[in-house]
Amino acid sequence: MNSFPTTVVKPESEYGVPLLPRNHGLAWYAAYTRSNHEKRIAMQLEERAVEHFLPLYSSVRRWTDRRIRLELPLFPGYVFVRFALGDRLRVLQIPSVVRLVGINGQPTALPDAEMEILRSRLSERSWAEPCPFLTNGRRVRVKTGPLAGLSGILVRRRSGLRVVISIDLIARSIIADVDSADLETMK
């Protein structure tokens, strides 16, 4: 039997950066950006092979002579980034990234479960739009549907029910249409 040295080949991204195992110290953080720079930052993160998430929604803007459909950030001023905390300079060195959101000057990781739900369920842009951050109202948990597992504040709007889902760390919210059968109250 021949004994050849074996080489372990680690998978690499298309940029030649070794891919790390899924939970190799990686966490989701919110990067606070300069106003209206979210898409540029997302492109630069893509070039640097940094995992990121920038949910968008469609909005029709009207002027006196025309209408235009725009793709706008669902969380204006923020791009979600997943990296090991020791690699934060790869994000902070991007022009227009102001800082990583955190407490007492230290970046604070967002809950992985919450980010995975948002990433997997925000592929359809038609059902969510930004909403002012609300702190009072009835707290509910979504049992079924695209936002199952998330909690939010129940509001009535246009003769229907909607849930305001807030990310407290960045003080931003989105509002989504829901059916009352998909909700359960929280204590």
Image (tube, rainbow, N blue to C red):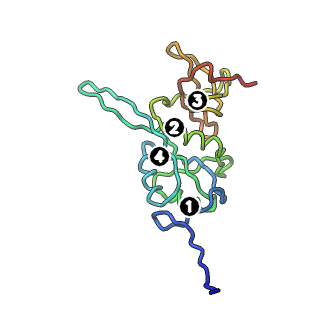
Q: Residues within 10 Å of mark 4 (few under 14, many from 20)?
A: some
Q: Which residue is mark 2?
A: 122
Which mark sits nearer the N-terminus, 4 or 1? 4
Mark 1, secondary structure of its residue: helix
CB under 8 Å between discs 1 and 2: no
Q: Amino acid at mark 3?
A: Gly
First along the sequence among labels 3 and 4: 4
**In the drawing, does residue 107 fall left or right of residue 177?**
right
Q: Is residue 181 left or right of residue 123?
A: right
Q: Residue at x 40, y 33 (%)?
A: 58
Callout 3: helix, strand or loop? loop
For residue 1, what is the image quadrant? bottom right
Identify the residue under disc 1.
89
Residue type for callout 4:
Arg
**Secondary structure beneath label 2:** loop
Give the Cα separation between the discs numbered 2 and 4.
23 Å
Q: Is residue 47 left or right of residue 3?
A: left
User: Residue 36, position in %: x, y?
Assistant: 42, 42
Residue denoted by label 4: 34
Disc number for residue 174: none
Q: In this picture, is 98 found above or below 19?
A: above
- Of the two numbered discs 3 and 2 on the same chain, state the one appearing first in sequence: 2
